[in-house]
Amino acid sequence: MQAQDEELVESVLAGKVELFAELIERYQGRLVNYLYRMLRNEEDAHDLAQEVFLKIYGALDRFDPRYRFSTWLFRVAQNAAIDQIRKRRLKLVSIHRPEDADGDGGDWELPGEGPTPYQARRNVERGTAIREAIGELPWEYQELITLRHYGELSYDEIATLKNMPLGTVKNKLFRGRQMLKEKLGDFLTD
Amino acid sequence: MKTMDRENVAEWLDLDVDGQLGEAERARLAQVLAAGGELAAERRRLEALHADLAAARVAVRPGFRDAVMASLPAPAWRRGRSWTLPLAMAVGFAVAAALALAGASAEGAALGTGVAVLDLLATALLAGSGLLAASWRGLALALEELISASGLSLAAMALGVLFLNLLFFSMLRRRRPHDPQPVLERAAVERDTIERQ
């Protein structure tokens, strides 16, 4: 049977430091994706995720086992992302290439694995459309969608993290997805 | 959750696609869905949205976990509490006391020395409390003079005491936990502004 997060924390504190790797394994994908949606830069998201894990490790003895490890982790990540957004001037590279002297513009050719150029382009367009659609949502919806679909937190965990009633979380996620559906329209997978 | 009807069936559908319904609720939803093709189309669109959101996830770079493990510092909770300094101080004090007693014993006056030290401490304590009492007495006299001067002075003083108490209470009051929501919103606005530049 898989150990609970809280049991792993206890074991790490008792000296089995190698078990911290298990916690990283469980949360690395969710944390990187959550931070990626916040920072909109993959490299920054990885760097910050590493910092968050180190911060968590350093403060492990202050973890209150009455609460879930996941909500603690994402709270730390949320604060770290805010600091990051303020500290750094995000350098974003547009996928849209400016026109050159010959009037030859268009999109950068992005490497793809497997799919045809048409599919690859379609995937890039869809990825961009999703990113933009999420970015256009009112902030409270944007945040809950990110926590649910990229942080992969449960409704209960989101309710705890955001200090919201469970019913409100359900309702806001529903409305957020409705808005996304409308915004994405034709981009939704057939 | 409310009972299922035509009004909120979309909400139920959304919860179902997100895996939030129990067996009984799913069975009831299936009955409603069987009635109309429009809802089945809505369900497909929702499933497509979930699939697209999932497809937009990024992969964690290889070796990320090992890189984090390799850079773990030695945290304070692993070092344990250091007793070196308190122990050194206690030993130093014991040695000094032993030396003082040994020196005094050599002259045959160990007990006398101890009594003298205690006497010194008692005198210092007495002098200190005397000074404190005198200070408070002086303050009390000044206040008494001020209060008895007029009714207005008394009222002003009462008001002053009230404000002082309120100040202490406000300082002692437990602060509410910081709500990060406005900060998050501001950060999102800043990020969007930067991106647009």
Image: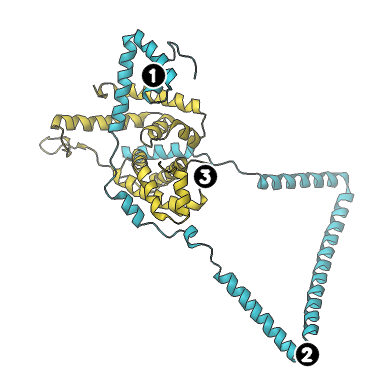
Chain colours: A yellow, B cyan
Which residue in the protein does label 2 denote? Answer: B108
Please state if B45 lies on the left or on the right of B156 as rendered. left
Point out which mark residue B13 bears.
Answer: 1
Give x and y (percent) for residue A67.
51, 41
Q: Are marks 3 and 2 on the same chain?
A: no
The amino acid marked with disc number 3 is Pro
On screen, residue A8 above or below A38: below
Cα separation between marks 1 and 2: 96 Å
Relative to B67, residue B33 above or below: above
Q: Position of residue A126 (x, y in %)?
A: 25, 29
Read off the residue under disc 3.
A65
Relative horizontal placement of residue A157, taking residue B109 as reference (left or right) = left
Residue B101 is marked as none
Discs 1 and 2 carry the same chain letter: yes
Pick whichever, A73 or A140, lies toward us: A73
Q: Residue at x 73, y 91 (%)?
A: B106
Q: Residue at x 38, y 37 (%)?
A: A151
Q: Are there few (<14), some (14-19), or many (20+) residues within 10 Å of tag 3?
A: few
Which of these two is toward me, B24 or A49?
Answer: B24
Q: Is residue A11 visible?
A: yes
| Chain to which mark 2 belongs | B
